[in-house]
Image (spheres, rainbow, N blue to C red):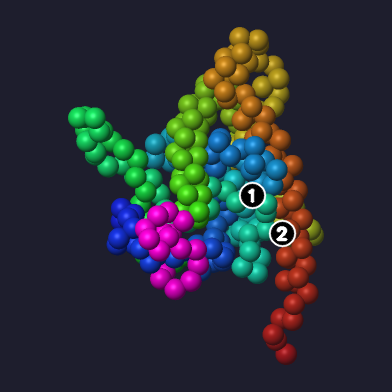
Amino acid sequence: MARYELLNNVSHKDLRIATSFGPEFGDDVGMVPAFPSEFAELQREYPIFLRKDPGSGEWQSVALLGFEQRENLFLRDGRWNASYLPGAAAKGPFLIGYQEQHIDGELRQEAVMHVDVEHPRVNLAEGEPVFLPHGGNTPYLEHIAGVLRGIRDGSAFGAGMFAALDAAGLVQPVNLDVQLDKQHRVAVSGLYGIDRERLVSLDGPALLGLNRAGYLEGTYLMLASLHNVRRLMAEKQRRLRVQDAAPSGKD
């Protein structure tokens, strides 16, 4: 179970973070949250879809990693085989929380970093140090702080963006049902994407509104990302061939 603590260079002075990848770190997931602030990077390697939160009804963008709930096709031999690591995976055991602080005589909610001390990446022996010997932030921690800022800003921007796309009638269900070969078929439910035909039929004022809000670029990046489904299919087919060729262990 997660146990978050306010990160500080006294209690956590010796903290290290394992940076390899594998199921033991919780990386065996079929999708991760994605944020518009990273769409330009994500769309080069990952298919980007939308999902609806069953509780709140709000939209969340996701990067698809595999065709099954516990399948990450980018994982191989302790590595994440992509040139860009999604922020949701890169942040590791850290998150941004808020703390009341007195600033210029006013009580404000200020963003502060927390760490899940029960996370499997957290240890005192190996991996990237969080703090320098004399207490300053390491380059690794500065990088994580940037990742968390991107997630925070992208999450707030995405809420408005996806609501606007839905209001414009641009969000449609995606039937991701793939026949990999004669023996294997995979399907992922609950995904939504952008209705390309509806997008190109929008009138000038509607397009102008989306563009001025900063939403149009991300919309086209989502559409462009869909070619990466073929990449996932190719890797899934490769793994199935290896699996089918392996000895069964039976006499």
Q: Quadrant of residue 48?
A: top right
Residue at the image point whose x is 71% and y is 24% from the top: 197
- Residue type pointed to by label 1: Tyr
Q: Relative to residue 154, is residue 167 depicted above or below?
A: above
Instruction: Depth check: give the residue in front, 144 or 65.
Output: 144
Residue at the image point whose x is 68% and y is 52% from the top: 83
Q: Which residue is mark 2?
A: 236
Percent position (x, y) of residue 234?
Answer: 77, 55
Q: Which residue is mark 1?
A: 84
Percent position (x, y) of residue 96?
Answer: 38, 45
Q: How many marks?
A: 2
In terms of secondary structure, what is the magenta stretch mainly? Answer: loop
Say which quadrant the N terminus sits in.
Answer: bottom left
Percent position (x, y) of residue 63?
Answer: 59, 46
Q: Quadrant of residue 250?
A: bottom right
Q: Relative to residue 25, is residue 226 depicted above or below?
A: above
* Residue 128 among those drawn in magenta: yes
The residue sitting at the bottom extreme is 251
Instruction: Read off the magenta span.
Output: 122-138
Q: Mark 1 vs mark 2: which is more N-terminal?
A: 1
Instruction: Depth check: give the residue in front, 60 or 216.
Output: 216
Instruction: Depth check: give the residue in front, 4 or 107.
Output: 107
